[in-house]
Structure formats: C-alpha cells, structure tokens
Amino acid sequence: MSIIQCDEDCIYQKDGYCQLELPSAITNYTGDGCVHCIRVVPKDQYEAARFIRATDAPTTQPAPQTPPAPY
C-alpha cells in the first residue's frame, strides 16, 4: 500500500488514502488528476446504463461465416 492521500470517489480510495497496490510509472499524465482513478458508479446508475445498452443491441444475429473450402 502506498501513502498517497486521495479524496476522489475511486475504487482504490479507502479512508482518504490510495489502496492501489503497485502504482506503475506514469508516462501520459495530462494534469487532469490521477491516471489510475476508476470512478465508483452507484448501483442504480450502473443498472440503468446496462439496461439501455441491452435494449440498444441488435435483435438479429449475424449469419455464421463458413470456412473456405479445402484445396
């Protein structure tokens, strides 16, 4: 565990500290906060988004592809 203070709503944040076991070297930092941050999504928002994605899916299956004929 690292001793990095964190106040983000992130899956790695616990009791005000980052719980990420082995943070790696950062090569693409843009200054917009922690690059490891994964926001916690409330269950109702997650399920609503999941339902929307499921209803937007196509209802027909694509035709299966046949393998090429052997020579």
Image (cartoon, rainbow, N blue to C red):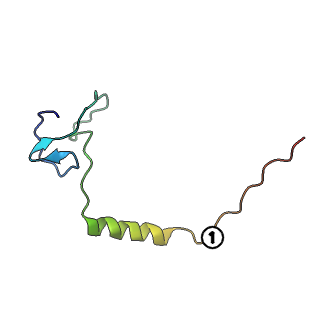
Quadrant in the picture for residue 26: top left
Q: Is residue 58 left or right of residue 18?
A: right
Between 19 and 68, the one nearer to me in the picture: 19
Q: x, y percentage for residue 64?
A: 71, 59
Q: Where is 29 relative to 37, above or below?
A: above
Q: How many marks?
A: 1
Which residue appears at 21% of the width and 49% of the height?
Answer: 10
Q: x, y percentage for residue 63?
A: 71, 63
Q: Is residue 50 left or right of residue 68?
A: left
Quadrant in the picture for residue 43: bottom left
Which residue appears at 25% of the width and 32% of the height?
Answer: 23
Q: Where is 20 relative to 51, above or below?
A: above
Quadrant where the image shows the C terminus: top right
Between 4 and 53, the one nearer to me in the picture: 4
Quadrant in the picture for residue 28: top left
Q: x, y percentage for residue 47?
A: 34, 68
Q: x, y percentage for residue 19?
A: 18, 41
Tag 1: residue type? Thr
Quadrant where the image shows the N terminus: top left
Which residue appears at 25% of the width and 52% of the height?
Answer: 39
Quick one: label 1, few (<14), some, or many (20+) residues within 10 Å?
Answer: few
What residue sits right under mark 1 in the picture? 60
